[in-house]
Amino acid sequence: MKVEYMDIKDMIFGDGTKLKEGLLTIDKQELEELLLKDARILSVDVDIAKPGEEVRIIPVKDVIEPRVKTAGGGSLFPGMLSKADTAGKGVTRVLSGAAVVTTGKIVGFQEGMIDMSGSGSDYTPFSSTINLVLVLKPAEGISAKEHEEAIRLAGLRAAVYIGESARDEDPQRIIEVHDETIKTLMGENENLPKVVYIYMLQSQGLLHDTYVYGTDAKRILPTLITPAEIADGAIVSGNCVSACDKNTTYHHQNNPLIEELLEQHGKNLNFIGVIITNENVTLADKERSSNFTAKLAAQLGADGAIISEEGFGNPDTDLIMNCVKLEKQGIKTVLITDEFAGRDGASQSLADADEKADAVVSTGNANEIVHLPPMKKIIGIEDAADKMAGSFEESLKEDGSIAIEIQAIIGATNELGYNRLAATKKK
């Protein structure tokens, strides 16, 4: 599959939604009318937040990258906005540098925030994107699940609507995302180590959900999926877990682990596939999924595996189970996770551990406290700052500044590595 990138330089409101030489014009009224077709949405307002502006978006539900299918059939976000045809074929065009951000009345207490400037902007990659922000108010009387679904689908619809503007413009760069069969991959570079990626998806329920082709991931058994399918939105975020390490839909669309494995394929390794697996609540379900994950990796003949987690605490057990069972199959593993080591960094980082987990990459300590300056403009609901995971009594100060753990910032310790924290050698 070809992925074509259009560099978005600026975004404004105007008549008709169109893209011309990097300037993206949004027809605000037309977009709002489109989203209000969902009766579960009472009202919608659309705003724009640009890098460097004194703007705070709070609480953030999801972030989505606008894309459009221009050739090869199929559609984006299969099983969500269209029937669940197999994705990952033809040509997909990306509006690079732009994002759709959903906000409004909080669904679950753990949703997070994005600061477009100031110290908070240093912790989120979405302070560097030009964000079209949807402020959505749900209809009275709907459940939390319906509320979450209405906002989730509104974000996807907006991303597809905006993506259409790129259909007739020329892309700035093109990459190939392989969708070859396992047989083909196994025949290539047979002397290089065979590496599989284990992609853990949040699926603990109670607004801790991820969707695969429109199906709640808690209902699936571990299975294979191609990088091209993922790029076309086969995996969609639907969870309200801690903002720092939840994978937004944008993260799934731009998974840097997959991008790097594709880059290294045929050079230093043979990237033989992606196995998606869920994070479960009961011990029996954890055992079942980790057994299937290890079985699939062994059947592929993997020599090594990279495992990324989503969330923390309970999912740490799924992470360690996957690691141990792969290692027992002779498959060397590298784990990617964040830490909840206390505000002083001295507590146990993970809720589970094993001596076989001896190659671990940390994406940061989510309990670190930061002090965020007041912003001139708030998009969303400022009082949500006192309700998010990572907040404490009177996190929101009278002057509009916020003292809070970085777990409240979207993407701060993202476990795909799509974040800005890095380790430095202590002098």
Image (cartoon, rainbow, N blue to C red):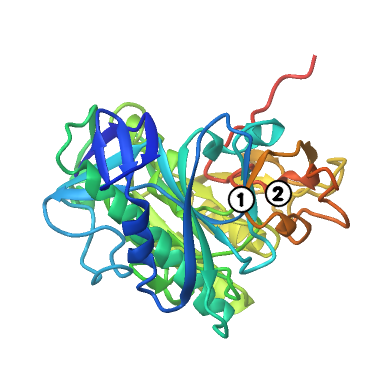
Q: Callout 1, which amino acid?
A: Asp
* Residue density around tag 1, few if under 14, some if 14–19, many if 20 or more, within 10 Å: many
393 above or below 93? below
The reply to whether callout 2 and callout 1 are in contact (CB within 8 Å) is yes
Q: Is residue 7 visible?
A: yes
- Residue identified by numbered label 2: 407
Rendered-image quadrant of the C terminus: top right
Residues 325 and 340: in front is 340
Q: Which mark is residue 13?
A: none
Q: Callout 2, which amino acid?
A: Gln
Q: Give the alpha-carbon distance from disc 2 to disc 1, as whole Å.
A: 7 Å
- Tell which circle, 2 or 1, labels the residue nearer the N-terminal end: 1
Q: Is residue 425 left or right of residue 150?
A: right
Give the x, y percent position of residue 21: 25, 28
Q: Is residue 243 visible?
A: no
Q: Which mark is residue 245?
A: 1
353 above or below 400? below
Residue occupying image coordinates x 38% and y 38%: 12
The extreme top residue here reads 427
Give the x, y percent position of residue 211: 42, 67
The extreme bottom residue here reads 141
SS label for mark 1? loop
Q: Is residue 29 left or right of residue 165?
A: right
Rendered-image quadrant of the N terminus: top left
Give the x, y percent position of residue 333: 53, 45
SS label for mark 2? helix
